Amino acid sequence: MVSAQTLERRIADSGRRLTEPRRQLIEAMRNLGDHFTADQAVQAAPSVGRATVFRTMRLLQDVGVLCQVVLDNGAIGYRLTANARHHHHLICSQCGATDDFASGGIEDQLAELGRQCGFDMHGHRLEIYGVCAACNTELDRR
Amino acid sequence: MVSAQTLERRIADSGRRLTEPRRQLIEAMRNLGDHFTADQAVQAAPSVGRATVFRTMRLLQDVGVLCQVVLDNGAIGYRLTANARHHHHLICSQCGATDDFASGGIEDQLAELGRQCGFDMHGHRLEIYGVCAACNTELDRR
DNA sequence: TTTCTGTTGATACCTGGTATCGTTTGGGTA
DNA sequence: TACCCAAACGATACCAGGTATCAACAGAAA
């Protein structure tokens, strides 16, 4: 779990103000655990206006500590992350847990593939769906 | 462009009825070209009820002739495709055009990566953003 | 032609997200 | 410490995507 200090420092370092609503939302999101929806974030910070929740979530995305996760069903989830660099997600269909991973190898392969098609690649998005180790052992036990 | 016959046959073959609203929506989507939003589909088939548009789009996804495309900004686009097998998308940020591609190599790599994390991979989603060949030559010309 | 089931459209509702706009506030400066 | 102002805020309205409900309708098989 990313510390509140880290999150707050990232905001401050980017030149934005560290306001009370932002602090409250950060705390609320941290309490939600490692994955949550926009609506859960809104619910979890009742003293913070809806618009501000979305504004702050966008801000956190901009400074690289919150990332969007495209779920199996196309819905969008969110996840706090310490790791600001580009990465991908492993998403458990069972429990919803998300994990980050990076793979330079795949990156290179994609760039090469794009070149072959005359496509100038600027970015990409890769989500992997399945069942995480914890849920797997859980299932085996039954 | 996928033919209307192909699309209609896919529906019939899956045991669903080929109704007038479904035919109209298919025609409307074909007229929209190779990528469109849900709202555009709704607008393009004014004689078809909104709920039916969404139901039919889900049906077409189920039979593998319509796919969701997650755009750069997180919005969802749609694309008719003849290619029912799993594939990925090249999405042009300039003109919005989407292209399909498949790559078994990447697939294998992902499965291996998942195994290493104890993650039992069931599926994935890969979207590549950039500038397509046509837009590239267009930009060079300026 | 009847019948039955799949399908439809209207409607209401939910979630995610943005735009607007008048008010508040953080934090640098006098 | 008080002042100031841009940044941030909240309420609100709005938009898009999507689902649930339910009474009415229509393919297609008997």
Image (spheres, coloured by chain):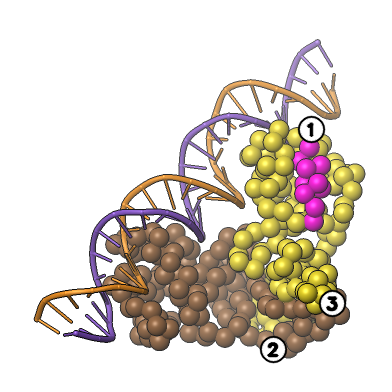
Chain colours: A brown, B yellow, C purple, D orange
Please name the amino acid that badge 2 sits on: Gly
Q: Furthest residue to the bottom?
A: A104
Q: What whole-number distance in Å separates the C-alpha atoms at marks 1 and 2? A: 49 Å
For label 1, the SS is: helix
B86 drawn magenta: no
List x then y, in percent, for residue A71.
Answer: 60, 65
Reading the image, the residue beneath label 3 is: A118
| Above or below B7: residue C30 | below
- Tell me the mark number nearer the camera, choosing from 2 and 3: 3
The residue at 68%/42% (across/down) is B43
Please name the amino acid that badge 3 sits on: Gly
Reading the image, the residue beneath label 2 is: A104
- Graded by Cα atoms within 10 Å as few (under 14), some (14 to 19) or many (20 or more), the crowding at tag 3 reads some
For label 3, the SS is: loop
Q: What whole-number distance in Å separates the C-alpha atoms at marks 1 and 3? A: 41 Å
Chain bearing mark 3: A
